[in-house]
Image (cartoon, helix red, strand yellow):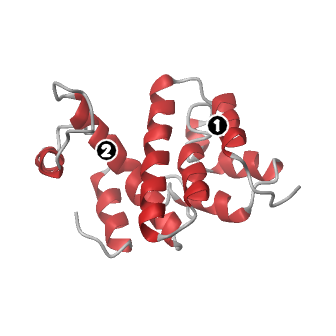
Amino acid sequence: MQGHTPTYEEALSIFKEFNKSESLLKHAYAVEGVMRYIARKMGEDEEKWGIVGLVHDLDYERYPEQHCQKSREILEARGWPEEYIRAIVSHGWGICSDVEPKTTMEKTLYAIDELTGLVTAVALIRPSKSVADLEAKSVMKKWKDKAFAAGVNRSVIEQGTAMLGMEL
């Protein structure tokens, strides 16, 4: 079973097995959606990228002090491919993991994990409470306000976008 390709249903089931928080599930869906969008734009495997985005915080609720490390153990025990596991573990690079993002999928997850938190926070203060009508300039305005969404690690976003050769 080692290295089998996980299905979306399997990924969602394992995420829900280890996480009960509605806000964490919403975050997982947001990261999944952005990963799928970027994969599609780059001609990459949208399903793989989406699954990685969905389960990236698999161990966060149950094992916050061992975030990323427990994900490796859990997914290896279930036979997940190393490519998926490495991407998931690398999203915590420099914070809770020493696995540096190397592939485009890993770098993308590293960059967008925190970014989705900021975008969501900006959307929630708007009358619509939606990202559908959110403009980049609104996010960038709040980006500069370090007190806004203070839990968002802006240096990770900056480092991640630089890894991808992009600018904010």
Residue drawn at x 81%, y 47% as measured from the top left: 78
Q: Residues within 10 Å of mark 2 (few under 14, many from 20)?
A: some
Front residue of 102/52: it is 52
Q: Secondary structure at mark 2?
A: loop
Query: Is residue 94 at all visible to an observer of this figure?
Result: no
Considering only vertical position in the picture, is 151 above or below 103?
A: above
Query: What residue is disc 1 on?
Result: 12
Comparing labels 2 and 1, the label whose residue is closer to the camera: 1
Across and down, in percent, residue 14 comes to 70, 36
The quadrant holding residue 81 is bottom right
Work out how far the residue at label 2 is from the one at label 1, CA to CA, in angstroms. Answer: 25 Å
Residue 7 located left or right of residue 88: right
Residue 43 located left or right of residue 52: left
Count of numbered marks: 2
Image quadrant where one finds the C terminus: bottom left
Q: Residues within 10 Å of mark 1 (few under 14, many from 20)?
A: some
Q: In the rendered structure, which amino acid carries the disc numbered 1?
A: Leu
Residue 29 located left or right of residue 139: right
Residue 135 located left or right of residue 92: left
Across and down, in percent, residue 92 comes to 50, 54
Image quadrant where one finds the N terminus: bottom right
Residue drawn at x 55%, y 63% as measured from the top left: 98
Residue drawn at x 46%, y 66% as measured from the top left: 107
Query: What residue is disc 2 on?
Result: 152
Across and down, in percent, residue 133 comes to 20, 39
Q: What residue occupies the far right of the structure in this picture?
A: 1
Residue drawn at x 17%, y 29% as measured from the top left: 126
Across and down, in percent, residue 162 comes to 32, 71
